[in-house]
Structure formats: structure tokens, C-alpha cells
Amino acid sequence: MAQAVRVVVLAAGQGKRMHSAQPKVLHSVCGRSMLAWVLEAALGLDPESVVVVVGHGRDEVRAAALAEFPDAPISFVVQEDQLGTGHAVECAAEELKGFEGAVVVLCGDMPLLRTESLAALLEARSAEDMAMLTSFTDSPTGYGRIVRGEEGELLRIVEERDASAEERLIPEINSGVYAFGCAELLTYLGRVESQNDQGERYLTDVPGMYAAEGRGVELVELLDADEGAGVNSLADLAEVRWGVQLRILEQHLSSGVHIEDPATTYIDHGVEIGSGTAILPCTVLRGGVRVGSNCEVGPFTHLREGTVLEDGAQVGNFTECKKSTIGAGSKAKHLSYLGDAVIGKGVNIGAGTIFANYDGVAKHKTLVGDGAFVGSGTTIVAPNEIGAGATTGAGAVVTRSAKIGDGEVWIGVPARKLESGNTQGNGGESPQIEGEEE
Ligand code: UD1
Ligand code: MG
């Protein structure tokens, strides 16, 4: 039977090195907080519970975790003052007392960590011993270094700021991810002191205590060293973003989404894309966007939250969509803003069309019926309706609530209905009913 596991996630720090008012673990990586990525990896172990140690921005952190995983066995303990990672784990002691299984401790600032690596860590630990994840890197700066003895055994972890010049050359780093037996962990934590450069109680002293007492410390090397990356600065955040992004892109590629240039394609967590769809370069798809099958998105397209593209829809060059549904086979291929619109099937949205959805106070909706043809440069002031099969002339300004009926043709500024036989339209100008088909 698999051993019982509880996880402790350290997330109380302010993240001073981020130079940001936002709690560090809530910084977003591909549309999701670092903490959420870490919690997902932890929950993948199917633990009895996950205890999150919170401090800075505790209400925000708690709310964010619960919003993302409302049904998961997550609880919170408060670390009032951030006295170090060892002290942080001690704050969770009440949640651990009497537990006889394994306790996995990890940091909330490592969004690339995978469940598989945590499972390997648990697998490597034998009774009363501990195991921890390490990795080798060319740039160990900032991390705790693994000091090994002659037999390759762990002697201790030394933090960068407490390390000698020689120790700083060690390329093996501490990922900050450990598996302990619960009773031993609590015993050793009680003995951790704060004799270091920061005057903090370091969790990293615990492995050295195990070693000093002759207990085993299993060093489990991460096969993918990037998983061990801890984010302490905005530069670190930008670096791990690419790792997370690549995983998301790989998932879409493997399910039949053609992504021409992954390097310039930004797809957040939680975007659905059907097979046969092409995502062209320089395109941004934000969280919650749904794209059907056989669509085309881009190049240079921004799909924001609440956007739905039904099968076969095409949205292209310099077009932004927000909270809009674009019906099957409809096209908006050039220089448009589609905000709060519900667009039917087989609609052509001409180049430069703007849905003016905001009146300075509130946002309003526009409905466009099936088969409508919106001419180039049309501005539709919301709220509004464009009927099925209706047409607007190039440059038309469809004023607020004008409501174009099914099959009607409207032209001019402000747009007026073109009565059959009246080819002069309003203002005596000749109507131009042109759109951009391709
Ligand atoms: C820590 C490790 C270091 C390791 C690195 C891996 C210690 C002393 N050092 O350094 O060996 O290489 O992680 O990324 O453990 N936190 C609290 N309460 C505190 C202090 C920290 O909850 O009092 C939380 C932070 O919010 C963060 C995590 O613990 O999520 C790690 O703290 P951080 O300051 O990032 O430690 P590092 O300097 O990265
Ligand atoms: Mg860190």
C-alpha cells in the first residue's frame, strides 16, 4: 500500500527580491500563480492534506489557493514573522503531530516542479531516513550547496551567504524539496538554531542533523534540472515562464494543434484548442479562451478572457477579441477589436471593424446574426444588433442601439438604412459596400 503523505508548502515570505507589493507566490506564470502550479504538483501525490504556511498577504494567498482548488484537502497555518524556512515548517507542527506517514516539504516558488519528481523522492526514502531533491547547474548562485563527504554521502547543506569561496564552487544545489518521517522531522526542527548570516532558523540544517546522527539522507537528482528552479527575482520569473510555456505548447502540439512558431506563441494555462487548428506566430491566448477545431488564429492576434472561437472561425492580423463568441466559419482577419460581441455563423467582419463596447462607464454587448457582412472600417457602438444576412457599408458608424434588421443594408455616418432603389445613401455619397474577404 502506498504510504500516507502530508505535504507542507512554504509560502509565507514577502519575496523582497521581487521588488513588488504582490506576495511572491502569487506572481503569475502563464496565467496561473506560482503557488497554484506547486499545489497542483503536490496534489498529484494524492496526499491526505496539503498545509500551506502563509504570512505576507495571507488573505490573498489563501483566497487564491482556494479559488483554484476549491475541493482539495488544503489547509493553512500562519507564520506571523518570517524567521526562516525551519521556523515556517514548525508553524505547521500542529497539523502534523501524531501523523505516522511521510511529510513532503517544498517551497511555493518553484512552478516547474512535477509530481513525478515528488513521487521519485518518496520512493527513495526508507524508514526513519530522509530524502531530498538536488540538481547540478552551471549557475548555482543564490542556492544552498550540497556538501558531500568522501563516499558521496551528504554532510550538510550550506547557504550561499554562509558558504566559503570553495563551497560556492560546488555545482550541486538544494532544490528545497524534502521527504521526512514525520516524528523525526518534528524532533530535529526543535533543535534548529539561528547561527547563520541571516539569523534565521533554516530548514536546510535538518539534513545535516540526520547525517550527523548516522541516519540516511538520500540525494535524489532531478533528471530535469530546471524543475529545481526557485523564483526569487523577476528575472527568475521570466526564466521559468519559458519552461512552463513550453510544456503547455507541447500539450497542444501533441493533441493536433499546429503551432508554427512556439517561440512567439503565448498560450496560458487553461486554454482549450481543438485539433486541426493553426496558431500562427506572434499570438497571445489568455486563460479561459476556447478555440474550436480547424480554426486559424494569428499572426499577431490577442485572444483575451471569455473569447470563444467556434469550429472553423478565423481571427487574424492585429485583431483583439475580449469576451466575444465568434461563430462557426466566421472571419475577422484584419485590424479589428471585438469586445463583448456574440457573432453568429459565416459572418465576415471587414478590416478595421471596431466594436465600441465601452461608453466610459459600462460595457455593452453587440449581437451579429448569421451570414452578416460587416464592411471594412465599420464602427458599431454598443449595445447594438446587426441582423442575420445584414450588410454595412465601408466606414459605416452604426450608432448605439440602431438595431439593423435581418437582410438590411446600412451605410454612412451615422449609418442609415439603404432603401431599395436609393443608391445614393445618406449625405449624397455613393455607398461602398466592401469588406475584406481574405
Ligand atoms: C531556499 C533554501 C536553499 C535552496 C532554495 C531553493 C533555506 C534556508 N534555503 O533558499 O537552500 O537552494 O530555497 O529554491 O531554506 N519562507 C517562509 N517563511 C520564512 C522563509 C521562507 O514561508 O520564514 C518560504 C518562502 O515564501 C519561499 C520558501 O519558503 O516560498 C523559500 O524561501 P526563499 O526565501 O525563497 O529561500 P531561498 O533563498 O530561495
Ligand atoms: Mg526561493
Image (cartoon, helix red, strand yellow):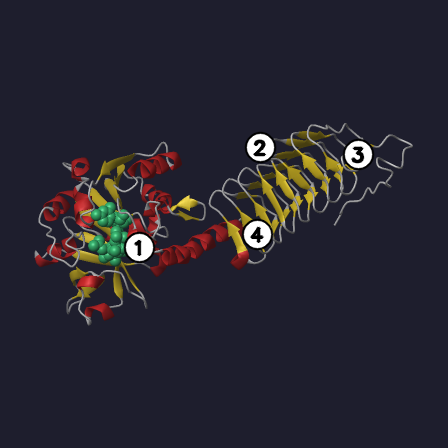
Q: What is the three-letter code of the residue carrying label 3? A: Trp
Residue 212 in view: yes
Q: Position of residue 238 (x, y in %)?
A: 41, 56
Q: Are marks 2 and 3 in contact (CB under 8 Å)?
A: no
The tag on residue 17 is: 1
Q: CA distance from mark 1 to mark 2?
A: 38 Å
Quarter of the rendering containing residue 175: bottom left
Return the disc, 1 or 2, that comes first in the chain's sequence.
1
Q: What is the three-letter code of the residue carrying label 2? A: Lys
Query: Dot 1: within a 10 Å radius of its alpha carbon, few (fewer than 14), some, or many (20 or more) residues?
Result: few
Q: Position of residue 244 (x, y in %)?
A: 43, 52
Q: Secondary structure at mark 3?
A: strand
Q: Which residue is mark 4?
A: 283
309 or 364, nearer to the observer: 364
Q: Which residue is mark 3?
A: 410
The tag on residue 350 is: none
